[in-house]
Amino acid sequence: MEMTFQDTLNLVLKASNEGVWDWYVGSDEVYYSDRVRDFMGWKSGEEINIFKEPEKILFKPDVAYFSNILEMTLADSDEELFAIDCRIVCPNGRKRWLRIRGIVTWQDEKPIRLTGSMIDISKRKRAEAALEEERSMLRLVIDHVPVQVFFKDTESRYVMVNQRQCDWIGAKNPEEILGKTPEDYFTENHWNISRSNDLKIMETGESIVDQIVCERWKNRPDTYVQIVKRPWWDSRGKLKGTFGISTDVTKLISAKEKLEQMALNLQMRNRAYMEELQLAREVQQALLPGRQGVWEEHIAPMVGKADIAQRYIPATELAGDYYDVMPLEDGKVGIFIADVMGHGVRSALVVGMIKGVMEKASSYASQPAEFMSRLNQGLTRILGRSKIDMFTTACYVVLDFERDHMCIVSAGHDYPLFKWRGESKITGHESKGPALGLFMQAEYHSVCCSISDVDTMLMYTDGIYESSNINGDEWGIERLEKAYREGGCESMEALLDYIDQRAMAWMGEKGFDDDVCLIGVRMKGANGLGL
C-alpha cells in the first residue's frame, strides 16, 4: 500500500502529538488540523482566527504579548520564525498552555502566508511552575536560615550564596560575590588553607563536619565559624565543586576564651586561697596544746595523778572548736573546751579572739566562774566592735589535786560525762550560764565535787553527737553516753578511739558534719592523789 506525502506527514504529526495550521496573512480564515481543534476544544464550525481575534481565545494576560510577537514577526522581512508559548481558554473554561511555532512566507518583502504547528505543553508548564515554586521556597529557606550557605566550583569560585553569606562577607547581594573566591576577602594564609581543604574534599570525597575555623580577614577583625563542607556532585555524578554551611560562633569562642581565662584566674586564686587556708590552719594548730613537746609541758602537773587524752577533728581546713590545758598555781590544772557557732574562717577568727582573751584573763584562771565571766566580757566587747553576730559555748574545769577538789563552769556548753566511784555526782542538769559573746553582764556559777569520787571524765563538743548518717539520723547524745559507758578501756587514748570508731560506724563514709573535740581524763585514785 503506497502512502502519499500527506499521509506520512499526518502520521508524523500524530506521533508527535502536534497539530498544524495555515493562515494567509490578512485572511479571515485559518486552516486548523483536527489535532488543533482538539487542543482548542472546538467542534466543527466553532473555529476562531487566533491571529486576527486573539482576545476571543487567549488568556487575557497573554493577548497583548501574542499580538506584539505576531506584529514584530510580520514586520521584519529578515524574520522567518514565529514562536510563542501562550495560554488559551477553552469553551469549557479550562486553560491550556500551547507552544506555537510557524514559518513566514515572504513575497516582494511582504508576508503572505504563515504556516506552523501547535502542541499542548500544559503538563510541562505545570511541572516547570511546580519546580519553580519549589526552587522559590528552597531559596526562601536558604536565604532565611541563620547560617551561611555557599556553593563553589572546582576552582573554589562562588557560584551560589545565600543572603546570610552576603551579609557575612559584606556584600549587598549575591551578584557581588559570584565568580570570586575566598582569596578576595581573606588573608593569603587563610585562603591557602581554605583552598587546600576544598581540594582534599574533591579528591577524597570526605567531608569536613563541625570544624571550628578562625577566619582571618583582610580588612576586619578575625571571626570564628563552625563549618560543614562536602563535595558537590550533579545529578549525573559529575563533580561540580564543594558546598557547605558555616555558623558564626565568634561570641561563643570569645565567651569560651573568657571562661577559660576566668577558670585559670579562679584556679590561681583558689590555689592562693588554699595556701592561705593552709597557713591559717597551721597558725590555728599552733594555738592548740596538742603539738608534740607542747602537750607534755601542759599536762606536766597531772603526771602520776591523772591520765589525759584529746581528739581534735576539724570539719574543714579551719575549725571553730578550741581546747586548752593550762598549768595553774599550786599544782592546779585548768581544762578548757569551746565551740564557736559554725565552722570555717569566721569561726576560726573567733577562736583566735578567744585565745587572746584567755591570755588577758589568765590571772583569774584558778577561779572558774570569774575566769568565764572575764572571757565573756572580753569576747562580747570585741564582737560588738566588729559587729559580728556570733556566740561561743564553753566549759571550763579546774582540777586541784592537792585539795582533792574539782570545779566546773559552763557557758551554754554541755557538762562533761562522768563515771563515778564515790558519792559525789554531777548530773549534767546543773544550771548553765549564757553562751559567750551575747551579754556583757552575764553571770556564771561553778559546780564542784571531789576528784577522788571521779573515775573518768569526758569533755566534748556537739559535733560528735550531732553528725548524722546518710539517712539524716543523728548519732545523738544517748549513743555517745552509751559508747562512753561501754568503752571500759585501760587508757584514755583507747577510750577516745572506741568512741570515735562507734561514731564513724554510725555515719559511714559521710564523716563528721561539724568540728569535733574530745578531752578524756582518768583519775589515778586516792593513792595517786596523795590523799
Image (cartoon, grey):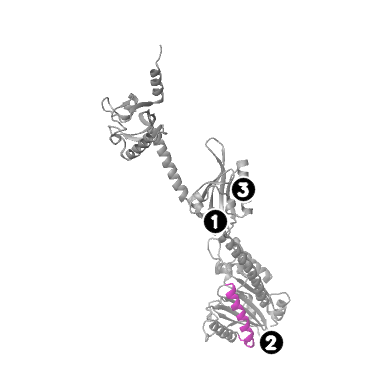
Q: Nearer the viewer, residue 202 or 9?
A: 9
The residue tagged 3 is 195
Tell me: residue 441, above or below residue 484: below
Q: Amino acid at mark 3?
A: Arg
Q: Is residue 365 above or below residue 414?
A: below
Calculate the distance from the C-alpha at mark 1 to the C-alpha at mark 3. Answer: 22 Å
The residue that disc 2 covers is 330
Cβ atoms under marks 3 and 2 closer than 8 Å: no
Of mark 1 and mark 3, the one earlier in the sequence is: 3
Which span is picked out in magenta? 343-367
CA distance separating discs 3 and 2: 95 Å
Q: Three-letter amino acid code at disc 1?
A: Val
Name the quadrant of the C terminus: bottom right
Q: Which residue is mark 1?
A: 249
State how far apart marks 2 and 1 are (Cα).
79 Å
> Which label's residue is closer to the chain start, 3 or 2?
3
Where residue 42 sits in the image (x, y, percent)? 29, 28
- Residue most toward the bottom? 363
